[in-house]
Image (tube, coloured by chain):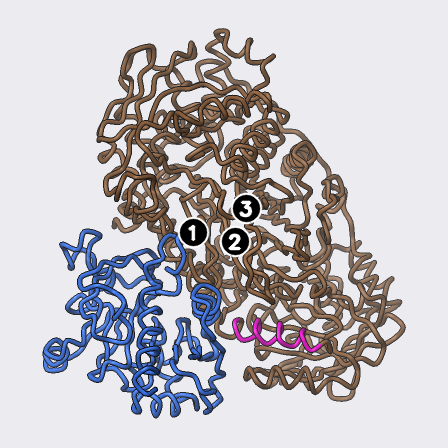
């Protein structure tokens, strides 16, 4: 006869199988004052998993700046909340769903999006935008087949490339499948490809929601005797131990067998849940609400009680169940999706239940709030688990894990990029760079997302450096301001120098937001790292935290929340440390959105450089070529053209970044520039080309180009504009064209506005240099000291850039 | 004059249609819950885009059985204006208020982008404010917009001039090249024989303001307003 799991006697071995260390097991017994039963052990194991407890990261996360005058809610709730004026608040957060997306790409990605959307509407905010930061293994062999032996990458065979393409395809379909049906636009994000992500893709989803400030909800149980109501999908056996086994352990060859641990998403159910929850909240009868995400019913009951300083009691036989014969262990640990737990005001249950009935959803009173701080789980009259909520939620293990910097990399000029001699024509290399998946147009991906539903998208994917959505007042529909969002994080740079790389992630995200015209105000972060049990990974983590903290402090953008994802390793190999920053900015005037597209032939192209005037003198003096080579060896160009990944990320000066950001915001507010585009991956040359490509009147990659008729007196622009640029740097040619040093942007300016632009730049201490002009016609040309170094029809450049991703993905 | 926007479980462009009519065109508009058989004295009904019932079974296949659809059918049969957008078009086909059926896009993927459609007929309540052959830039966002019908139905449709919008290129010269989803005869939108019920896959409510990339979709709602004003005058 099979033994019911509840009857299993807990032993130290079983505790170990649940991922609890002997010391953690001892603490469990100490908190309970007795041995746990198997259900209680399961509850402790998920609550104390890395994923739910942040036990290895807590001590470091404390160093992040989290306060600011606009911050309404910092880390610790379902999402961070900032004040955006006019009585409105924005709730936003980024979260990872990495391991599930490798095991089962489609469902992993859908439930990642579903989870972050629930986090937002749990707060009472209606989701209005989603962004996705994605990292995959290489999908084409261009520049990748022999990349970076120094960084420990395995060689790529065709099977790996094909597997990566399948993962990419599944993830994209999953993100689209969920967001499109739910009715939230997926407006942006970023995608990068590195060999280290081959068996560990990163899927980080960010959601943004809007609420009136007085309508915010928090997950704090209050009022002993208040009913606890379960709403949404029925509980099934899916996703049991998702948080502890999938998210908190590294992968082995058997990981595919963990497919049953991946949950299955239903966006239609979530859409109903959204509408019903927002409607129920409006009744005034809802006291608190918490979604059931990782660790399901366990996490929601325990955290609501712990935050409210109350106890909670629920009856498992009342929980709607999809399958028969589920044990308390299974019900408590299930991660079935699209479920919520809420506390209603006693006596007003029917108002709440009525709303859910209208939307055709299960809503059942399953328990009540109690005094005394105990979480009591009953099943058919007996007590299945009884645990003090606060110690379980808040007094879990905290580790200050050993940290060890890796041995310094010993490199010499031989390991670095060797610059082409002066006067070399670089057109062919430029074409190759434009066609590389990292740089190429992401149209093939973003067209599979609904980017325009909710009619707020002022700048969708590729239109501006950041995604820009306008805000409608939830009650009056009146258009207020606009919000800009960007996600960034260069794992390759963080591998070479985690502190500097993390600073760049913050700086680039903020720069992107500013280049859309918005003022960066707050950030959310998703920290993707290897195993915290490795001292060198903890060193990377600690360094990255310090880098983020420094940069967020310097730029005045506190971190309001986010997520840590450890154990991103397969077969003992860690991914590049990849902190992803989601930056939120605010734009007071919706008509001042800056886009990257050049708009009028004859406009002047101005290069803005935030490097202070003082440092500019030294910077313009010829640098040692070895310094340039060292920095350039970490660039996209070096990786793509020479298969070299080495050296250091570009040095960064946060004061320079701040100056440029302030200058861009001022230029947008004064309406004196026609376009703006920051300089990042692929350097100045790529930025110039992208501004040309985006000018096409009918760009298939852009859901929201300026209507052709609205461009200033030039009629429909069905061919793109081009650029003629003259440089006179003393740096090596490739360094000038493709270097990725930050704090720089290009803007296009009408002749009449040039003086105003130069004056504003001077006011903010930003160097502004006219480097060329926007032209009509097909010739794209960059000259260095009077000699053409890139010269090619812009239509041909565009073809290489526009279609290569689709070609790579659909190739067999 | 009053517009009604039907809300099915899973509708997600209901707010957008409401906003385009109420806030951009500034005409009276209200939501109608799918369980209601009362159309609240509305003069025009919009079935909005979205994923009613999660697209389970087939797009629009379950929504057509919602109680509100009985009233919509009666309303349509008595000459009332009904416009189905995207999922609304799919529902109208399932309900038999419009001919034909939807298949998966020929590329088997969801597509969201601006497309160009040509106004083929101007003697309908949805196109009377447009000029013949006018090209409209309007976004699509769907997986199943590959409209099709048997040869006889198609011939009948063309003969009756019921094809009111056809996909084309921005210059209006190459319809095949402008077709995003494989729809037969490049059909983007059709009307019924009586010309008071129409469906189209592109989203005119998303093309109602230049700030969002195009205001070309407004002409469809303006046409409906004109038709209602004209009808009111005729009965006065």
Label 1: how many Cα within 10 Å (few below 14, some 14–19, many 20+): many
Colour that chain B carries in the picture: blue
Label 2: how many Cα within 10 Å (few below 14, some 14–19, many 20+): many
Residue shown at the point (50%, 33%) measured from the top left? A492
Q: Is residue A493 magenta?
A: no
- Label 2: which residue? A470
Residue B211 is tagged as: 1
- The foreground one among A776 and A683 is A776
Closer to us: mark 3 or mark 2? 3
Q: Earlier in the sequence, mark 3 or mark 2?
A: 2
Chain bearing mark 1: B
Picture coordinates of residue A752, whole percent (x, y) = 41, 26
Vertical position of residue A84 compared to residue A377: above or below: above
Q: Where are the magenta residues, as a range?
A: A271-283
Chain bearing mark 3: A
Secondary structure state at the residue bearing disc 2: strand
**Figure quadrant of residue B75:** bottom left
Vertical position of residue A778 compared to residue B100: above or below: above
In this image, A246 relative to A671: left or right?
right
């Amino acid at each position: 006869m099979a033994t019911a799991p509840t009857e299993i006697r807990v032993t130290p071995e079983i505790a170990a199988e649940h991922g609890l260390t002997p010391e953690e097991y001892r603490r469990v017994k100490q908190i309970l004052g007795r041995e746990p039963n198997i259900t209680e052990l399961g509850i402790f194991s998920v609550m104390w998993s890395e994923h739910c407890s942040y036990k290895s990261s807590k001590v470091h996360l404390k160093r992040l700046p989290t306060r600011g005058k606009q911050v309404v809610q910092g880390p610790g709730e379902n999402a961070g909340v900032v004040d955006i004026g006019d009585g409105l608040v924005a709730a936003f957060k980024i979260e990872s769903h990495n391991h599930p997306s490798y095991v089962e790409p489609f469902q992993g990605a859908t439930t990642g999006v579903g989870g972050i959307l629930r986090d937002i509407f749990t707060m009472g905010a209606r989701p209005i935008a989603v962004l996705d930061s994605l990292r995959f293994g290489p999908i084409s062999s261009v520049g990748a087949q022999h990349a970076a032996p120094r960084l420990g990458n395995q060689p790529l065979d065709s099977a790996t490339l094909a597997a990566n393409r399948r993962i990419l395809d599944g993830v994209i379909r999953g993100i689209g499948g969920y967001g499109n049906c739910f009715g939230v636009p997926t407006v942006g994000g970023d995608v990068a490809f590195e060999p280290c992500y081959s068996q560990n893709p990163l899927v980080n989803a960010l959601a943004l929601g809007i609420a009136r400030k007085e309508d915010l909800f928090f997950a704090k149980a209050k009022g002993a005797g208040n009913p606890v109501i379960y709403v949404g999908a029925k509980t099934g056996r899916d996703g049991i131990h998702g948080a502890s086994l999938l998210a908190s352990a590294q992968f082995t060859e058997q990981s595919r067998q963990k497919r049953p641990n991946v949950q299955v998403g239903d966006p239609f159910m979530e859409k109903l849940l959204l509408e019903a929850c927002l409607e129920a909240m409006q009744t005034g009868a809802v006291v608190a609400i918490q979604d059931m995400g990782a660790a399901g019913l366990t996490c929601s009951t325990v955290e609501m009680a712990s935050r409210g300083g109350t106890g909670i009691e629920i009856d498992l036989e009342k929980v709607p169940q999809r399958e028969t014969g589920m044990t308390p262990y299974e019900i408590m640990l299930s991660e079935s999706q699209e479920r919520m737990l809420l506390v209603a005001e006693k006596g007003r249950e029917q108002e709440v239940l009525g709303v859910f009935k209208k939307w055709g959803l299960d809503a059942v009173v399953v328990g009540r709030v109690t005094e005394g701080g105990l979480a009591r789980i009953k099943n058919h009259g007996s007590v299945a688990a009884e645990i003090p909520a606060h110690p379980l939620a808040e007094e879990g293990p905290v580790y200050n894990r050993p940290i060890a910097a890796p041995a310094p990399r010993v490199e010499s000029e031989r390991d670095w990029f060797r610059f082409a001699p002066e006067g070399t024509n670089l057109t062919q290399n430029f074409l190759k760079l434009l066609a590389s998946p990292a740089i190429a147009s992401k149209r093939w991906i973003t067209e599979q997302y609904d980017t325009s539903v909710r009619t707020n998208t002022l700048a969708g994917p590729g239109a501006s450096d950041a995604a820009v959505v306008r805000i409608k007042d939830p009650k009056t529909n009146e258009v207020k301001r606009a919000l800009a969002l960007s996600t960034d994080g260069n794992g390759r740079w963080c591998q070479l120098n985690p502190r500097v790389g993390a600073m760049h992630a913050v700086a680039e995200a903020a720069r992107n937001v500013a280049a859309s015209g918005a003022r960066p105000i707050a950030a959310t972060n998703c920290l993707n790292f290897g195993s915290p049990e490795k001292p060198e990974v903890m060193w990377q983590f600690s360094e990255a935290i310090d880098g983020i903290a420094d940069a967020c402090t310097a730029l005045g953008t506190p971190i309001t929340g986010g997520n840590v994802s450890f154990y991103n390793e397969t077969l003992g190999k860690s991914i590049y440390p990849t902190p992803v920053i989601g930056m939120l900015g605010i734009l007071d005037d919706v008509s001042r959105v800056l886009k990257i597209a050049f708009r009028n032939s004859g406009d002047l192209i101005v290069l803005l450089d935030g490097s202070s005037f003082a440092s500019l003198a030294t910077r313009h003096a010829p640098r040692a070529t070895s310094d340039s080579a060292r920095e350039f060896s970490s660039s996209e160009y070096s990786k793509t053209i020479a298969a070299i990944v080495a050296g250091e990320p570009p040095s960064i000066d946060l004061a320079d970044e701040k100056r440029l950001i302030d200058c861009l915001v001022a230029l947008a507010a004064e309406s004196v520039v026609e376009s703006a585009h920051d300089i990042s991956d692929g350097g100045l040359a790529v930025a110039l080309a992208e501004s040309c490509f985006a000018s096409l009147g009918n760009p298939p990659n852009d859901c929201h180009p300026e209507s052709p008729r609205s461009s200033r007196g030039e009629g429909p622009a069905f061919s793109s504009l081009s650029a003629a640029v003259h440089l006179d740097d003393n740096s090596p040619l490739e360094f000038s064209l493709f270097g990725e040093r930050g704090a720089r942007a290009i803007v296009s300016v009408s002749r009449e506005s040039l003086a105003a632009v130069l004056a504003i730049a001077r006011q903010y201490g930003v160097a502004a240099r006219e480097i060329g002009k926007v032209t009509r016609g097909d010739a794209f040309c960059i000259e260095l000291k009077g000699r053409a170094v890139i010269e090619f029809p812009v239509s041909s450049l565009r073809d290489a850039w526009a279609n290569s991703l689709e070609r790579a993905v659909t190739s067999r | 004059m009053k517009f009604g926007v039907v809300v099915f479980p899973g509708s997600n462009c209901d707010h957008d249609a409401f906003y385009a009519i109420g806030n951009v065109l500034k005409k009276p508009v209200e939501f109608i819950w799918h369980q209601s058989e009362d159309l609240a004295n509305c003069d025009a009904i919009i079935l909005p885009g979205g994923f009613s019932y999660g697209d389970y079974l087939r797009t629009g296949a379950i929504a057509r059985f919602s109680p509100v659809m009985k009233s919509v059918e009666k309303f349509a049969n008595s000459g009332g204006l009904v416009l189905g957008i995207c999922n609304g078009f799919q529902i109208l086909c399932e309900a038999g208020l419009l001919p034909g059926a939807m298949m998966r896009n020929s590329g088997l993927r969801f597509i969201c982008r601006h497309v160009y459609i040509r106004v083929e007929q101007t003697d309908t309540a949805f196109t009377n404010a447009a000029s013949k052959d006018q090209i409209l830039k309007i976004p699509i966002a769907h997986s199943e917009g590959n409209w099709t019908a048997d040869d006889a139905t198609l011939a009948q449709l063309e003969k009756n001039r019921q094809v009111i919008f056809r996909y084309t290129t921005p210059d209006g010269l190459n319809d095949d090249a402008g077709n995003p989803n494989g729809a037969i005869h490049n059909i983007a939108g059709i009307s019924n024989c009586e010309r008071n019920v129409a469906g189209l896959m592109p989203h005119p409510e998303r093309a109602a303001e230049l700030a969002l990339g195009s205001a070309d979709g407004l002409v469809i709602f303006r046409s409906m307003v004109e038709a209602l004003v004209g009808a009111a005058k005729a009965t006065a």
